[in-house]
Amino acid sequence: MGRVLLTWRLAIRDIQRRRARSALLLAMIVTTTTTLTIGLALHKVTDSPFARTRAATRGPDIVAEVGAPAAASPGAPQDLAREFAPLIHARGVAAVGGPYPITFARLTTRHLNVLAETEGRDVAPAAIDRPALTAGHWISPDGAVIERGFADALGLHVGDAIDLNGRSFRVAGIAVSTAQCFYPVSTPGVIWLTRPDAESLGATAQPTNYVLYLKLDEASDAGAFEDGDAAAAFNNGTGNDVQSTLTSWQETEDSDFKVVSVDQKVLLIVSTLLALLAIASIAVVVGSRMAEQTRRVGLLKAVGATPAMVAVVLLAENLLLALAATALGVALGQLVAPVLTNLGNGLLGTPPTPPLTLTSAAEVLVVAIAVAAGATIVPAIRGAHASTIRALNDPAHPPRRRPALIALSTRLPVPLLLAVRLVARRIRRSLLTVASMTIAVAMVVAALTLQHNDEVRKQVSLVGTTTVAGRVTHLVFLLTAVLIVLAAINAIFTTWATVIDAQRPTALARALGATPRQITAGLATSQLMPGLLAACLGIPLGLALYQAAGGHVHQASPPILTLLAVIPGTLIVVAALTAIPARIGARRPLAEVLRSD
Amino acid sequence: MTSDQPVLSASGLSKEYGKGAALVRAVDDVRLHVAQGESVAIVGPSGCGKSTLLYLLGGLERPTSGTLQLAGERLDQMPESRLARLRRHALGFVFQSYHLVEELTALENVELPALLAGSSPRKARERATGLLEDVGLGDRAQHLPSALSGGQRQRVAVARALANAPLAVLADEPTGNLDSAATADVLRLFEQLHARGQTLVVVTHDERIAATADRVISMRDGRFVDETKLTGGTARSLTEMAGLEG
Amino acid sequence: MPDPAPLPQDEPLHGYELRVVREVLLALLARDSSHGYQLRARLALALGPLARVLNDGQVYVTLGRLEKAGLVSSRRVGQTDRPDRRVYELTPAGHHQVTEWLDDTGWRKSAPAEFHLKLVAAAAAGLADPIGIVDRQRHELLIALSQAQRAALAEPDGSVAALLLEGVVLRLQADLRWLEACARYWNSAKER
């Protein structure tokens, strides 16, 4: 019991003593735990909103649509509707709704100009697909009902005046339905009108498409129905010019939540990256303080602690931070998750925030501990087995000698000579820096690839903010920004650690005649070299990440020049970040450093 | 520079730390001229400011007031980068804790100033090899500092200080960390340097090192209080000192 | 170095004789006269634990000799004629002796006791600044050290004479260290 108390006390005191460093470590782990929590929360989003809405609106099991191409020869409206025949009389069909006319019309107000899909309906409530009103009333002559997600996106309310294809209407009400995927998953958004109104909007006074709703005896048979004879007859029976589509309710549901699954995949990938980045960063932070830790180890062993206990004491501090980070990350994640699980008001009721299950919290805790432990386990074990006297007298782990690099550096100009020797002193730290910068660059490249995705560009320019792909883009940009911030902090810290670690040799170099500018250049270059390597490695890694997240690199293919521009871009950013610590390090008063020992 | 112009010349040199009630004058109105080939030792109790004075003379710290000239150029106002360039060829430093780079061999340590001054790798190496021979460590050229004794490390440091043939060598407590045997080695070296006409300013509390100089200046509380010329002066019989005469 | 005042040879010397006791007693009388027991007390104070070597009566015997040598004079005070109760004072010859002693920078094996007492006496007598005495002595020793060291370094390797010279050097170094301590003490004494 006493040992536990002692470990606790040592860990707490050390955290208190080095607040800035502990806060830094905490921040690094928190980013990981938060993203992970959100990812896990999305994983648990249930499909209840969809089921609830489907039940409330008597949603159809099968939706069939036929539509003639735009410049079609005007057949009689009834002709098109006849295509539905095989379906109406198919086996297993319990009820039929429609066919209803569909016209694409331009919705305009003083501020808006968007494409909309109008559906002509009966004023009386239908048997199948009865859109549930969340505001106002059902359709009336000149009274339009707008799909809720669409209305929210456009900022329209009951009573607003709109024009459809030039004709004025009033917004009579706002409703939700599961007949189609909700806006913005499916665009354009749906507006319900009376049949005469809908028909009057057609350019040739004829609606473009017809839609039919089917209710089956068994809702779960919808998939089988799609593969069945009736469906085949429907699909084949339509003429060459006529497009026909058949959608089951499960497919609609899946599409509605596709956005979530993409989000989730992206989040899981990014939280893995963040975890790796956090490990690399923490390893640098811990490594830079190894001399202190080693002395502590020596002290503990000298007063009788076993190697196991020593390792525990070393780990304890970081494990405490991991615990705190888990608590913070889970709390933050629970706050932020609803923003992502909220699917834009397309369905009845916002989905309840997935409750925090013990398993999710435990999973996050395990990851946090793994991150903290992963970064400190090697020094902890090494420290626990080190010789006690050496630890007390000579705690700083001396830099390893790399004769090849030293010999190489003699041929280089002074700043490069210094840079190469600085890197050679602490190869492991340089490699960790490369790793963390590579991760950041990879994320940037993946984001750039996404940016260049043609679909994204098209959709973004069409309606603005909230398309599926748009959500993903925003998510990716947000997470890229987080990663970049983390990598930037890491770069600054590494430079600072290098400055401190190298303060005697750099002071010596200055005493021997190196100018401050040469020293600054040397310190900065010692970070630029890892940066260059990171940029080269990060580009292919980023493209691979994009592919892993479900994108197609061939489709997106950002221009080669843009990709290559990442290299100088990275170098400029690294130079900017490291310039200040490097400059400070190069101008410290010489006498202080040289005098003491 | 003509041979009668002093190599180092300080006048009214002062260095203050802190402010108001906590003001400390580490160096207080010091006047010093070191001629070419002269060897000056500055002695005094610890905390008297002698190390600070040395760092001022070497341009490693900026004086609060006063003027300082090295080879005729004014140091006290010089920008940092020019100072660094001047130090390359004009000064060599020997520190109490050697300040050798731990991961470089003795040879690589000695050639460092030449490399920093832009010399070609081959020339730097040749000169470094010669210097190590001069100090008697030619056979230890490939050793790391951790494999050398304290005295050997300091001799490497002296060789390094001579790498660019400096006008003056400034040494801060060169035997501070050494036992008596190592001190003897370094002592011999300083005598050699002195005999060769190297201008030397040594700060020390070791009377033996001070005794190798031409002049010994005593410092107390930042000021020069006393000076002894070791060349000339009354010759006290060695036999009497040895106790052979009563 | 002037010879000390010739001692009457008829009286054998007892116990541990400090030559310096003569000079110190003279110096202690330089400012004003003093009772015998006062002189003994001040001497004991200056020597601390080493005062044990002073025989009882050692001081008074020396005072008697000094009187015989004409360097001090004494008179009886009160009823008793005990030496510790007599009052002693310096003669002009005694003053001269003191001055010469204070100026002498010879360095004998009997240092540090002699030098220490010289400083104490100088301070007590107000005749000379102890710090000046220390500085002058330091100069001499430093020059001597320098010569001895150069001689030692000039000896070929393995020379046995170098060992002797090394011994001289090390002792001189030790003496110089002690002189440094003297300077520190007497400096702060001045400030007090």
Image (cartoon, rainbow, N blue to C red):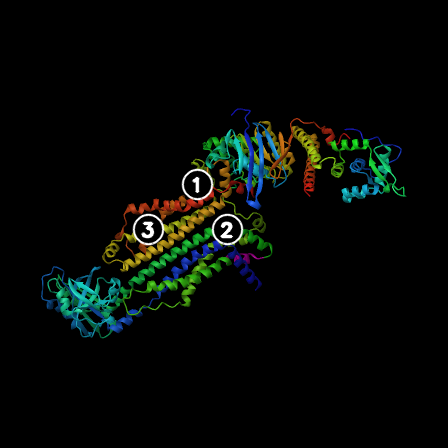
Q: CA distance from mark 2 to mark 1?
A: 23 Å
Q: Which residues are magenta?
A: A305-315
- Mark 3: which amino acid? Val
Name the N-terminal-most of marks 2 and 1.
2
Dot 2 and dot 3 within a common chain: yes
For the residue pair C27 and A227, the one nearer the viewer reads as C27
For the residue pair A379 and C113, the one nearer the viewer reads as C113
- Mark 1: which amino acid? Gly
- Which element type, helix, strand or loop, lies under badge 3? helix
Q: CA distance from mark 3 to mark 1?
A: 28 Å
Residue under pointer 3:
A445
Above or below for A331 versus C67: below
Name the N-terminal-most of marks 3 and 1.
3
From the image, state whether disc 3 or disc 1 is nearer to you.
Answer: 1
Residue under pointer 1:
A522
Above or below for C129 versus A255: above
- Mark 2: which amino acid? Arg
Disc 2: host chain = A
Q: Main secondary structure of the magenta part?
A: helix
Disc 1: host chain = A
User: Is there any visible trace of residue B156 in the rendered image?
Assistant: no
Is A197 situated left or right of B140 in this image? left
Residue under pointer 2:
A289
Residue located at (34% from left, 56% from top): A478
Q: Residues within 10 Å of mark 1 (few under 14, many from 20)?
A: many
Q: CA distance from mark 2 to mark 3?
A: 33 Å
Is C20 situated left or right of A305 in this image? right
- The quadrant the C terminus of chain C occupies is top right
* Picture quadrant of residue A477: bottom left
Disc 3: host chain = A
Looking at the rendered structure, which numbered label has been put on residue A115?
none
